[in-house]
Image (cartoon, rainbow, N blue to C red):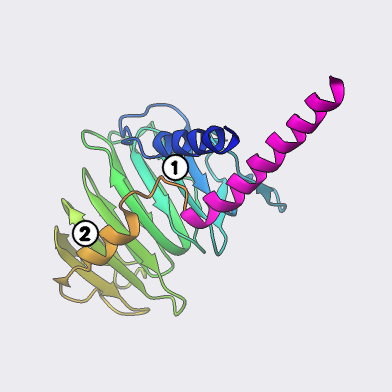
Amino acid sequence: MRFIFVFLILIGTSVLFAEEIDTSIEGSSRIYFLDGTVKYKKKGQNSWSDAELNHKLSAGDEIKTGENGKVTIKLANSGVIRLKELSSIIIPEVEENKPEKMSFIKLVWGVLWAHAKKAEHSLTVATPTAICGVRGTKFTVEALEDENTEVNVLDGVVAVNNSSPALSKIITMIKAGQATHIRKGKAPLKAFKARTAFIKRSFDKFETISKKRLVPNAKKLLYLVDELDKSLSEEK
């Protein structure tokens, strides 16, 4: 009976996090899903805290994942982003006073997957070497250790340029199924074939807890049920 109880809890958890993400969210940015080590730091502070599900994020807050961490964030008015392990971003501020609403995300390091909301809102992702402007598209941006950047487009079009002012006017348009690489001090390379299959393997069913983490959780739940059984027996 105890094993059935724990199994149902774990299955219920997996189903909850496997639901389709609604990109039409309005209002505040929030943590939609997390697994493993995920930390956040409020704007203007130096200390990091453990992130929590449905945590409200403000402009300037920073999110980072550990070696076993991953997180999905619904951005205010602009879609959804996913961060793999060892990644970090700064939550953007929506500039409502401009004719076109815009979210400007800074990818500090790591790998970011984004599904930008269609319509009037645009999404821009910046790394130390690149600026990627998108609308109504799915793509990934990887900020590499050598300050290089790789962009892969799954759907739609992404305009990519080097973040250096001297090279900012050299723009490369990347379409679905294409990718580009931006080296420090260089213009983006001509489009080449995207790593579509690899990206899909990495991000399909992203909002599910890994089997490695389900086993410890099951053991913990069984322990708690055992303790409950003991306490109930002692009361008889």
Looking at the rendering, which quadrant does residue 193 occupy?
A: bottom left
x and y percentages locating residue 52 in the rendered image: 59, 39
Q: Which residue in the protein does label 1 denote?
A: 73
Q: Which residues are magenta?
A: 211-236
Main secondary structure along the magenta-highlighted residues = helix
Q: 200 or 86, which is in the foreground?
A: 200
The answer to whether 116 appears left or right of 72 in the picture is: left
**Residue 40 shows in the view:** no
Give the residue type that dot 1 points to: Ile
Classify the position of the C terminus by image quarter.
top right
Q: Which residue in the protein does label 2 denote?
A: 153
Looking at the rendering, which quadrant does residue 23 occupy?
A: top left
How busy is the neighbourhood of tag 1: few (under 14 within 10 Å), some, or many (20 plus)?
Answer: many
Q: Residue furthest top?
A: 236
Q: Is residue 226 magenta?
A: yes
Q: Is residue 35 above or below residue 31?
A: below
Classify the position of the N terminus by image quarter.
top right
Residue drawn 52% across and 41% down?
59
Residue drawn 16% across and 62% down?
173
Q: Is residue 156 magenta?
A: no
Residue drawn 44% across and 68% down?
128
Q: 193 or 205, which is in the foreground?
A: 205
Q: 23 or 120, which is in the foreground?
A: 23
